[in-house]
Image (spheres, rainbow, N blue to C red):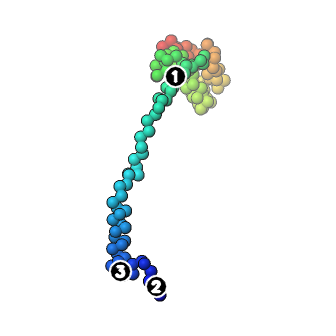
Amino acid sequence: MKRSSSPSTSSEISSSSTSEYKQECSKPSSPPDKKPKIEKETPSPKKTKSTSTSTNSIPKTNANGVWDGDKRSLFIDEVLSIGYKNANLDEIASKLGMNKRQLVDQLVPNRKTNLRGKIAVLVKEF
């Protein structure tokens, strides 16, 4: 029988595996996290600012929290609308000695002579 050329004794195995390990460790390795820097040939185009063509847009002077008459009037109108929808008008009418219809008439939007319209005008002029 022929013997194989591979090391058969334990000392031969350990010395051969040790030499292979040393060879692998001595190889320079590049860090895996670093990526090569690639320079851009042309810079990316800059975005242009678009202008609004809407007719209902708020002017720039009033855009950042500046109150004007129109904003105050719209705000009060919304608050009155929400309050009117959630109020118990029967109870309020009985406290004031009026009927519910009289209260409703005073809170109808887009009338200049009722209470809601007068409040909107006052707030707008404020």
Q: Residue at x 33, y 65 (%)?
A: 22
Left or right position of 54 against 126? right
| Mark 3 closeness class: few <14, some 14–19, many ≥20 residues within 10 Å | few
Q: Residue at x 41, y 52 (%)?
A: 32
Residue on which the image places disc 1: 49
Looking at the image, which is closer to me, 105 or 52? 52
Q: CA distance from mark 1 to mark 3?
A: 76 Å
Looking at the image, which is closer to me, 33 or 22? 22
Residue on which the image places disc 3: 10
| Mark 1 closeness class: few <14, some 14–19, many ≥20 residues within 10 Å | few
Q: Amino acid at mark 2?
A: Lys
| Mark 2 closeness class: few <14, some 14–19, many ≥20 residues within 10 Å | few
SS label for mark 1? loop
SS label for mark 2? loop
SS label for mark 3? helix
> Where residue 86 appears, x then y in whole percent?
59, 32
Label 1 vs label 2, nearer the camera: 2
Could you say which quadrant of the image residue 84 lies in? top right
> Where residue 78 appears, x then y in whole percent?
57, 25
Residue on which the image places disc 2: 2
Label 1 vs label 3, nearer the camera: 3
Label located before the other in sequence (1 or 2): 2
The image shows residue 13, relative to residue 37, as above or below, that is: below
Q: Amino acid at mark 3?
A: Ser
Find out whether the residues at labels 2 and 3 contact each other: C-beta distance under 8 Å. Answer: no
